[in-house]
Image (cartoon, rainbow, N blue to C red):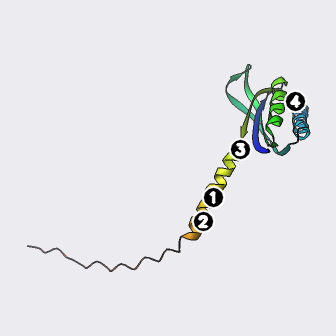
Amino acid sequence: MNRTYELMFIIRPDAVEEDQTKLITTLETTVTAAGGTVKSTEKMGKRRLAYTVQRFHDGLYMLMTLEGSGEMIHEVERRLRVTELVIKFLTVRIDEEQKRLDKIKRIKDERRKAAPAAPAPAAAEPAPDVTPATA
């Protein structure tokens, strides 16, 4: 069963552009070889890490959106574990969240269509002018 996943990984800050491109190409070929597809790849740039990871304070963030099976994700994660360039990674399944958001949107649209146009409020009568009595 094909599912949609987001894969975020952090590359060592001292990695050269050529190594980054080679890693991304390797991951893309791994995904396609396992019967999946790469929907998008985004280089988010160099950012400060929240805590030190393998003696690094900064890292190059990458975000990939993948579609495929669980076996494909296991293979991609295995490759990320053995790659020295990658210092952290996280894979999240996002198809359930997308289904939930689509359902909420559909319900809101149905409510908008079902609710008749609200009638314009009637003009209120002006309050009578009352002056206080002086004694």
Q: Position of residue 51 (x, y in %)?
A: 66, 25
Q: Earlier in the sequence, mark 3 or mark 4?
A: 4
Q: Specify the amino acid type for callout 3.
A: Ile
User: Could you give the CA–CA distance between mark 2 and mark 4, rounded to whole angstroms?
Assistant: 52 Å
Question: Which of the two discs, 1 and 3, labels the residue nearer the N terminus?
Answer: 3
Asked if labels 4 and 2 touch by Cβ distance under 8 angstroms, the answer is no
Amino acid at the residue labelled 1: Lys
The numbered dot on residue 16 is 4
Spatial separation of the CA atoms under disc 1 and disc 2: 9 Å
Residue named by callout 3: 94
- The type of residue carrying mark 4 is Val
* Label 2 or label 4, whichever comes before in sequence order: 4
Q: Secondary structure at mark 2?
A: helix
- C-alpha distance separating marks 3 and 2: 24 Å
Query: Is the C-beta separation of discs 1 and 3 under 8 Å?
Result: no
**Location of residue 80 in the rendering, given as x and y in whole percent from the top left corner:** 82, 28
Image location (x, y in percent) of residue 127: 28, 77
- The residue positioned 64% from the left and 50% from the top of the image is 100
Q: Residue 106: x, y in percent?
A: 63, 60
Q: In the picture shown, does residue 70 fall above or below 84?
A: below
